[in-house]
Structure formats: structure tokens, C-alpha cells
Amino acid sequence: MGETSMWAERTVKNTLTDSDTLKIKPFSFSGIGFDIRTFPVLKTYIDSGKIKVEYDSAKNGMAEYDYKTNTIIMGFRFASTYTETALVVHECVHAVYDVVSQKMTTAISEAIAYIVQCQYVYANAGPGKRLSSKDPKKDSVFQKAWMIAAAIQEGKTFTKLDKSNLIAAVSEHPYYAKNATADAGFDGV
Ligand SMILES: [Zn+2]
């Protein structure tokens, strides 16, 4: 069970307005735009209690956004590395689309969140610091999202093939395989 944590909430709010986060560049994916200028707005939703932040030790270093309870659930209270902060960024992307009830599939939702997460690491840790996983299916998602994130950060365009490769990788990822084509469920906060 998650618990209210002032520190976890502070970590999320600091991430939303941090200058490192503002290095994430806008892009469009499958007709859905992402703009980091939505993040400071998301902070006002946390301030007003419409979106909650909880700490759950069972999450064990991971994080999750629950669109049913409008809660960002963190497996850590403090983000001490770019990798951890990037996880916070990933969940905040889901929360932003929940605020505006954006319709999309789970695969598209995760693709966008991974691109933003990878952009954060690329912009701050550097091009040599690709996110990775020992699980080949999870690593494939990082690899494909990282390619697109690098292109966006370098002011280049990404191709339709890059896009379909990422969607295919997300659809094979053990967490999302079951409901990749289902609606992501963003229903407002
Ligand atoms: Zn996600």
C-alpha cells in the first residue's frame, strides 16, 4: 500500500519545474503532441490535491501512475540519479494526459512516456548514457525510444519505421504486452 509522503511529493514537484527537465523538447507521436510546458501546470494539480503522490516501498525503486485514483506512486522518496528522476518524468507524462483525458492506446502512451524519459537522460547525462535493461524485451523499448529521443534532442526528424519499431517493442514488453492495444484509460482528474 502506498502512503502519503511529503518527500516523494516534493521530489515530483521539484522535477516538474527543474531546469534539467525543461531541456526536454516538444514532439508529436501518432498525432499526439507533447510539450514540457505542461509540467509546471501539472504541479498546480498536485498543489490542489487533484493529483496525489504516494510512496510505496513495495514498488522497490520503480514508479507508476494510477489513472483511477489519479496518483503517482513512487518506489523511492528521493531521486538521486538521472535514471530515477527520469522515472518520475515518465509517470508525470501519463498524469499530464490524464488531466486532459487524452484518448490513446497503452502502446502509444508508453511510447511517448519512454521518449520523454529518454530525452531527459540524453539531455542531462549525455548521449553515451542510454537507459538499458538486462531483460532483452525491456531493453528493446529503451533502445528504440532512445533513438527517437536522440533525434529530437539533435533537432532531427525520426522516421515512420523508428515509430513502428518502438510501438512493436512496447507491445512485446512484459508489462504492456497484455493490453498494448487497449485504451490507456485517461479519464480526467
Ligand atoms: Zn508508463
Image (cartoon, rainbow, N blue to C red):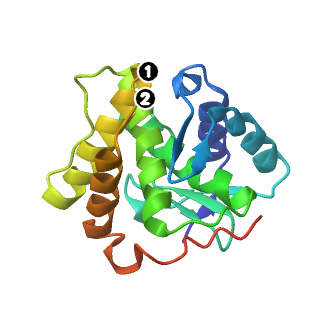
Picture layout, residue 183 above or below residue 10: below
Residue at 41% in and 47% down = 114
Q: Is mark 1 within 8 Å of ligand 1?
A: no
Q: Is residue 83 visible?
A: yes
- As drawn, the residue found furthest toward the right would be 48
Locate residue 10 relative to residue 79 in the image: left or right: right
Identify the residue position indicated by label 1 in the image. 155
Identify the residue position indicated by label 2 in the image. 152
Residue at 29% in and 36% down = 147
On the rendered image, what quadrant is the C terminus found in? bottom right
The residue lying toward the viewer, choosing from 64 and 78, is 64
Q: Is mark 2 within 8 Å of ligand 1?
A: no
Q: Secondary structure at mark 1?
A: loop
Q: Are marks 2 and 1 in contact (CB under 8 Å)?
A: yes
* Number of marks: 2
Q: Is residue 77 visible?
A: no
- On residue 126, the disc is none
Going by the numbered disc 2, the residue's amino acid type is Ile
Q: Position of residue 22 (x, y in %)?
A: 59, 24
Whole-Å distance between the Cαs marked 2 and 1?
A: 5 Å
Locate residue 175 relative to residue 2 in the image: left or right: left
Locate residue 29 relative to residue 179 in the image: left or right: right
Q: Position of residue 56 (x, y in %)?
A: 51, 61
On the rendered image, what quadrant is the N terminus found in? bottom right
